[in-house]
Amino acid sequence: MSAWKRTLYVVWFTQLLSLMGFGFGLPFLPYYIQEMGMSDPQQLKVWTGLLSAAPAIPMGLMAPIWGMLADRYGRKLMLMRAMGAAVLVLFGMGLAQTPMQLLVMRFCQGLFTGTISSANALVASQTPDRRMSMALGLLSSSTFIGFSLGPAAGGLLAHAVGYRASFMMGSALMLLGLLLLITLVREAKPDPQAAGSWRSMSLGSFKQVLNPLVLLLLVVLFCLRISRSAVAPYLPLYVQELRGIEGSAAVVGMITGLGALASATSGLVLGRLGDKRDRLRLLRLCLLFGALISLPLLFIQGLGGFSIFYLSALLLIGGVEPVISSLTTRHTPAAVRGTLFGLQGMVSSAGWVVSPAIGSVVAIQLSTRYVFALLPIMLILALIPAWRATKRGRALATQKEVLQGSSS
């Protein structure tokens, strides 16, 4: 087996364990804080938004720094840092006694973790360009499958032994993934002296990464992250409004798990198509049809119909982020791809910050159901930079053909 495939498969499995660990407890934070004594409906919505947004600001600030450190000292080291911190953070969440303590741990999660960006950077640094879409699509499936199995098992576990035990078991899974990463993954570390000074390295990295096409794709990523992050925290509250709190954790876990499975399937399919088809066209089609199929969420009242359209939308847009990552990676030099994924993490975190604030306002001023209107709205907005990126991509392709023709 080639070295890049070995890295891909091992990192895939460690990230499966990692995201299962997170999925054991995080989807049920609204129920967890009710168990702590939070009973006022308006305060519950505010705290749901706060807990959802808390990791985003520190994660957005730190992601480019971790990315540059990965380019300088090694991507495996940064993934080990992220997973090791997650072990401690999840354990701390299981020990939290008040919503404020939980908020502090969520802030620490954003400050020190970030396993997805680190894993993407490690895999992208070793994968041939011709297989990049497949590799990143496969890796993204570990995220969604982990979030599929984690909430499904976590919901049942929480019902049986409580939310604290779910966080503790999530921490144990994260530790197992960390040990596998340390043992099985090998990486040739970059030479820090060859990278130059911090100032020259950072300025040079950003100049190589932030070309016009990548900037447009980062805007698409920002809109996409808002579309998903705004609605996910309010799914437990919406299910509770429809059927009551008794047994809702298991229902939310099942919907979240099926949604993650749909996203994983989308990532695998689009990842393979992306190596054979026009990635920008795939991006546009997924955004368009995802927006159309998510429109009925605003009008459907029953849990069954809501679940069908919600899961169908996730099936269409679940593979979009790997397509974006593949496109940005293709137009970024290999030496600064850690910085690239750090910037993508920063943009994703910025969307993560904005989305709960928007969701909280909509949920309080209108109702929880109207939060789900943000999904089609943001997907439609994402189509604008996606179209501009298509024009830019065609211009670059034409320019490349001209250069190749003149050189021959």
Image (tube, helix red, strand yellow):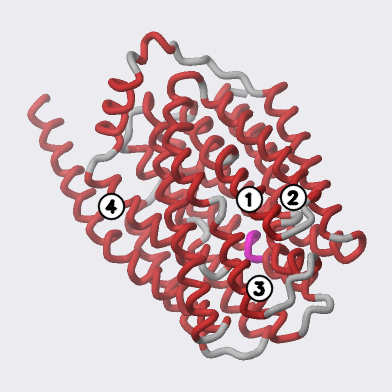
Of 247 and 141, the residue lying toward us: 247
Say which of marks 4 and 1 sits in front.
1
Mainly helix, strand or loop, the magenta region?
helix
Pick whichever of labels 2 and 4 is earlier in the sequence: 2
* Whole-number angstrom distance, CA of label 1 to CA of label 2: 8 Å
Question: Which residue is disc 2 drawn over?
Answer: 93
User: The residue tagged with tag 1: helix, strand or loop?
Assistant: helix
Task: Evaluate whether residue 64 shows in this view.
Answer: yes
Q: Amino acid at mark 2?
A: Met
Front-most of residues 364 and 176: 364
| Up/down of 243 relative to 212, above or below | below
Span colored in magenta? 257-261
Q: Which residue is mark 1?
A: 106
Is residue 147 rendered to the left or right of residue 381?
right
Q: Quadrant of residue 78?
A: top right
Whether tag 1 and tag 2 are in contact, CB under 8 A, the answer is yes
Q: Which mark is residue 216?
A: 4
**Residue 106 appears at what percent x and percent y?**
63, 50
The CA distance from mark 3 to mark 1 is 17 Å
> How far is the residue under mark 4 from the one under mark 3?
36 Å
Inspect the image, locate mark 3, and give the three-letter code of the amino acid beneath it.
Leu
Residue marked by disc 3: 44
Inspect the magenta stretch and tell me whether residue 258 lies in it: yes
Element class at badge 3: helix
Quadrant of the drawing holding the C terminus = top left
Position of 76 compared to 159: left or right?
left
